[in-house]
Amino acid sequence: MKVSKRPGSGPWGTGVSCARDRALIDRQGKRYLDKGLKYAAPTGPRVEQALVDDPLLLRTPIARCEGRATVGYVPEVWTTWLG
């Protein structure tokens, strides 16, 4: 999923909106399931707090380039950044 955003004052320095916060959490990851978040899925401000409390919940890689960002493995987007 491609996510575009400007630098902001949030803990990630990217001004992530609530809708995009959800893209940052690895909902298929073992950590997410082990913490029982599958059934108590955080939304809104709780997403950002969950990521601050446990950064291992982040989907990776997170790549940024000139005000643009991607979450997850999307090499087709990264190649457009290079040329």
Image (spheres, rainbow, N blue to C red):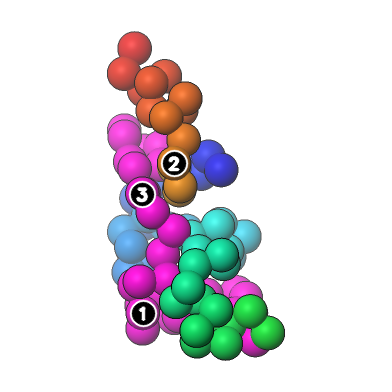
Contact between labelled residues 2 and 3, with CB atoms less than 8 Å apart: yes
Magenta stretch, residue numbers: 40-69
Q: Is residue 2 above or below residue 60?
A: above
| Foreground pick, 40 / 6 | 40
- The image position of residue 56, as x and y in percent, is 35, 71
Label placed on residue 61: 3
Secondary structure under the numbered disc 2 in the rendered image = loop
Alpha carbons under labels 1 and 3: distance apart: 16 Å
Q: Is residue 75 above or below residue 60?
A: above
x 31%, y 34%: residue: 65
Mark 3 surroundings: few (<14), some (14-19) or many (≥20) residues within 10 A: few
Alpha carbons under labels 1 and 2: distance apart: 21 Å
| Foreground pick, 7 / 31 | 31
Alpha carbons under labels 3 and 2: distance apart: 6 Å
Label placed on residue 7: none
Mark 2 surroundings: few (<14), some (14-19) or many (≥20) residues within 10 A: some
Q: Nearer the viewer, mark 1 or mark 2?
A: 2
Q: Which residue of the protein is positioned furthest toward the top in this rendering?
A: 83
Place residue 40 in its image quadrant.
bottom right
- The image position of residue 77, as x and y in percent, is 46, 27
Inspect the image, locate mark 1, and give the three-letter code of the amino acid beneath it: Asp
x 36%, y 83%: residue: 53
Label placed on residue 54: 1
x 39%, y 54%: residue: 60
Residue underneath mark 2: 73
Of labels 1 and 2, earlier in sequence is 1
Q: Is residue 13 above or below residue 35?
A: above
- The image position of residue 63, as x and y in percent, is 34, 43
Q: Is residue 3 above or below residue 79?
A: below
x 45%, y 47%: residue: 72
